[in-house]
Amino acid sequence: MGIFTRFRDIVSSNINAMLDRAEEPEKLIRLMIREMEDTLVELKAACAGVMAETKKIKRQHDEADDRARFWADKAQLAAAKGRDDLAREALVEKRRYRQRADSLEQELSDHQGLVEQYQNDIRQLEDKLKTARDKQRVLVQRHIHAERKRRAQEDIRRIDGAEAVFRFDELESRIERMEAEADLVNFGRKGSLEEELDTLTVDEDIERELQALKEPHSSDRKNA
């Protein structure tokens, strides 16, 4: 496929319609962008070649035009000196260079028109490539969001599943057992201060009970 055929196909293509019909739009847009980039490189290379050729033709045209004027001046000088023979020869050279200059001028005009066409094609293709790259960014973002949504839905399904609920219940039971075991570590044991206070309470009770036992004996001794 020639460069111009590819260029026309690309420019005339409807990117959105092609992507809508594609089974793998992301893959298709990558291929389209690659094709556009390759075509753009070829267009720029071709344009550069024509521009170089245009400069060469312009230089040749200017040289032929200069030579035509040179021989025109010589013919005028020879005629003024009465050398009609030399004047005729000079006029022949002038006509030859003028014809060459005219031919090169037409060729130069054709090449300049071709350069303008290339530059216009390049601008169109660059616009098309920008549109494709923007579309690619949109597709990538859509893919990322879709993937995140898919993963979130999978996570939600896993959390809602019976197995996940069972694991949560099992974890909760394990934590409750650990808390109960921690409570049992000090179960029945009291701190030293609490123990001393309890001892004092016990001692007071014993002293009162002992005093109560002594009171009857004390009354008997007083009566005696």
Image (cartoon, grey):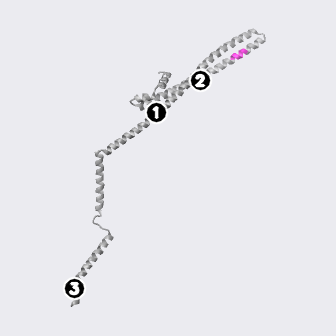
> Looking at the figure, which quarter contains the C terminus?
bottom left
Foreground residue, 90 or 142?
A: 142
Q: Secondary structure at mark 2?
A: helix
Tag of residue 135: 1
Query: Magenta segment range?
Result: 67-72
Give amino acid for label 3. Answer: His
Q: Are marks 3 and 1 in contact (CB under 8 Å)?
A: no
Tag of residue 217: 3
Q: Nearer the viewer, mark 3 or mark 2?
A: 3
Q: Position of residue 41 (x, y in %)?
A: 51, 27
* Residue 84 quadrant: top right
* Residue 215 quadrant: bottom left
Give amino acid for label 1. Answer: Lys
Name the residue: 45% across, 33% down: 136
Q: Residue furthest right?
A: 81
Foreground residue, 143 or 67?
A: 143
Tag of residue 52: 2
Which tag, 3 or 2, sits closer to the chain's start? 2
Crowding at mark 3 (Cα within 10 Å: few <14, some 14-19, many 20+): few
C-alpha gap between disc 3 and disc 1 = 112 Å
Foreground residue, 119 or 165?
A: 165
Give amino acid for label 2. Answer: Ala
* Residue 91 quadrant: top right
Q: Residue furthest bottom?
A: 224
Q: Is residue 15 magenta?
A: no
Principal SS element in the magenta part?
Answer: helix
In the visual, does 168 lie left or right of 75?
A: left
Name the residue: 49% across, 31% down: 131
